[in-house]
Image (cartoon, rainbow, N blue to C red):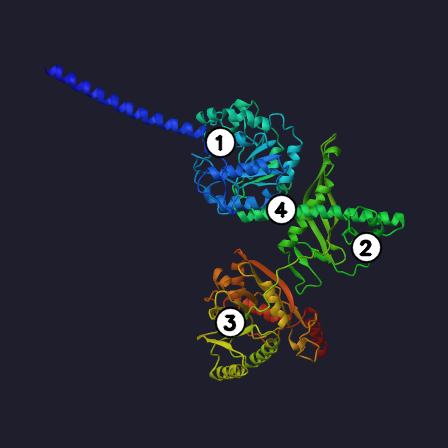
Amino acid sequence: MIELKQRSQLLSKNVIQYMCGVVIGFTICSQLTTFRYQWTETPFCSLHSHQSPNNPNYRPQSHTEPLDQLIQSVVQHNDGHNLVLIGVMTAQKYLDSRALSIYKTWAQSLNGRIIFFSSSSSKSSYGIPLVPLPTVDDSYPPQKKSFLMFKFMSDHFIDRFEYFMRADDDVYINTERLEELLRSVNSSRPQFIGQAGVGNKEEFGRLSLESNENFCMGGPGVVMSRTTLQIFAKSIHYCLKHLYSTHEDVEIGRCVRRSVGIPCTWSYEMQRIFHHNSSHEQSIKEDTISSRQLLKAITIHPIKKPSTMKALHLYFKNKEHQELRHKLNQLSRMMIKTSHLLNTSVDEILSHLSDSYSKSSHLGQSIDFNSLSKRESYIPWDFISHNLYSATNINPKRHVESHIWRSIENNIQDIMSLINRRSKQKGRTMEYKNLFYGYMRVDPMVGIEYILDLLMVYRRYRGRKVTIPVRRHAYAVQTFSEIQIRETQVYEPSKMVNIIVPLSGRIEAFQRFIENFKEVQTKDKYISLAVILFPDSTQSLNQTKAILNDVEKSGIVVKVGQLGGFFSRAAALQRGSAMFSMDSLVLFLDVDMHFTDEVIARVRLNTIHNKQIYFPIIFSQYSPQFVNDNNLNNRDIYEDRGYWRQFGFGILSIYNSDLQTVGGFNVSIHGWGMEDVNLYDRIIQSNFTIFRAIDHQLVHIYHDIHCDQSLTSIQYEMCLGTKLTSLGSVQQLAKYINLNKFLKL
């Protein structure tokens, strides 16, 4: 009986285990069936017509409607741009940053179409062409995302494009050079193009690759011809089930090798044209954009910041613009030479050409370059070495500004590319090594002229190999193009400009400022005044209030604020801005400024809400002690009467809300200076545009500057610099010193 009972218990236990196994197996099978259904019957595998709302920015919540709309737009509105379809793999957190910067820059000039692929729940706030791949998340590595992206492109666009490219959201593509490369390749044959990789030292031998196998590195981009993708797509199911590594690009390369039978392009040149920054600083930065390594690149990877993507795009567009201008100048010179040979004018030649050329075009206004050599060189040259030496600048020896170095480097690159344009045919090349010195000047009739002393290395690699250092002078001209006229938005003439002035004592200067304000107010009624007072002394405070009472009696309303303690311009300006609403336009002035109604008009024109902040460059008068002019009230601008404050940022106009967006003034800064530089630096780092221009009717009237030794070292140094600069010009001070020496003799 006991044995029978044990057998019964064992049988019951086996039945329970069997039933649990059936339930578990059924659950697993149902999940696999669901996955297979999602694989073969995804929403983008069958098209259904859906009517979208009228709003063009509308993006439905479901996957089917936007995908249908996207596919139809690519299929029906190809407009002949059918060379390449680029699929960009991205993630939800980068859709409105990296992906958006791509869509706004190089994607606009693509001879083809671009589609962004992300996880199943991804959405864009800016309406970029997006495919949320079902059953795909944003986890790394993106193996499934990459394979399904190629499957999507094969299923719907295999007959619409010649090439298909896989790209990351941190790569820049020079679309013109990409088109030039793809046009030179036979798209009807299997092609697998990119920078070949075999893995780094740590991965070598661990990627299940044979000695003769490679893969196309995914970062710089991978290009497949139509034939390659058509064959490769049939093996995607199998390859996804047989992954040998965690690297997405390795598995793509392995699958292409297995199905199509071709490796990635074995070519050393691909490392240059599909550029990948493999240094320890992985991301391309803005200060390395002009590197010679990037000049011939088709793709550049990686670029992590959208601002760098925009800067790189602007750099290549500027290079393209320079090349077009160079061709235009060559045509211009040819036209002039032809007119001399035919003994006729350029206008007569243009009249016989097609109507697409206008007599007022750039060709008709070309400069006679043959006559330039006959002109006297009355414009002085600046000498460039480790420093910049200039006879016309207030500082004759100074550091070379970064924009001058960039311009010189760009010209040297153009010179070297011109020298080496037939290097392959001639079997030699010239390499740039160093710049010994140079000269530079700006000729308003021509452009910016350079004379550069270059050290180069001559290398001959055909026949007898030769390597020789060569030193040559190069003459380069960045010619000016014709004047471009464009329309700007019309500013609102009735927009109130609220002037804010900090004040501590300075009764005479304040009285002069008030008279100036009254004069401007008679011509422009839409200005107001706010004065922030510091108690310099009881007497001066009473005198200031008496002046303000007289102003109010004349019908002009003045807002008055008062702060205690020592003078702080930052605290005064911040207090003054708080007196006005957030949508108010405020102009920060000093009591020593003289302005006109035209200055107010330019403030309205050059200050744009949520976009642009205006920092006018003012004219600062020299000390009357060194100015040979009896009329001290003269506000006219002459070289010997003053100088332009190019590095002064205290006078600005800004909307109050924009001021608060950048954090306002730093009220912890006390005394003279630094508050304007601090604000300027923060505006540079923001998304606002800074507009700087000379305003010849905005004059700083000279006054003695007292530099308090209690200031910080930086403030004290800046104060002394401004004080000494404002005394007089170098020529005037030199005459004064020589005169004193003569009198002592």
Task: Report the front residue among 518 and 254.
Answer: 518
N-term mark: 4 or 3: 4
Q: Most extreme residue toward the left, as rendered?
A: 1
Task: Report the front residue among 279 and 616.
Answer: 616
Q: Is disc 3 surrounded by few (<14), some (14 to 19) or many (20+) residues within 10 Å? A: few
Name the residue tied to disc 4: 290
Q: Is residue 456 above or below residue 217?
A: below
Name the residue tied to disc 1: 46
Q: Is disc 1 surrounded by few (<14), some (14 to 19) or many (20+) residues within 10 Å? A: few
Q: Count up the numbered dots.
A: 4
Task: Report x, y in % for residue 142.
Answer: 46, 35
In space, the residues marked 3 and 1 are separated at their CA atoms by 79 Å
In space, the residues marked 3 and 2 are separated at their CA atoms by 55 Å
- Identify residue type, mark 3: Gln
Can residue 466 be seen in the rendering of this structure?
no
Task: Report x, y in % for residue 490.
Answer: 62, 62
Residue found 16% across the figure and 20% down from its top: 9
Task: Report x, y in % for residue 420.
Answer: 72, 39
- Identify residue type, mark 2: Leu
Q: Nearer the viewer, mark 1 or mark 2?
A: 1
Name the residue tied to disc 2: 372
N-term mark: 3 or 1: 1
Task: Report x, y in % for residue 718.
Answer: 56, 67
N-term mark: 4 or 2: 4
> What mark, if any, has residue 87 been given in the picture?
none
Q: Nearer the viewer, mark 1 or mark 4?
A: 1
In space, the residues marked 1 and 2 are separated at their CA atoms by 69 Å
**Could you tell me which secondary element the residue under label 2 belongs to?**
helix
**Could you tell me which secondary element the residue under label 3 belongs to?**
loop
Verify CB contact (< 8 Å) between mark 3 and mark 1: no
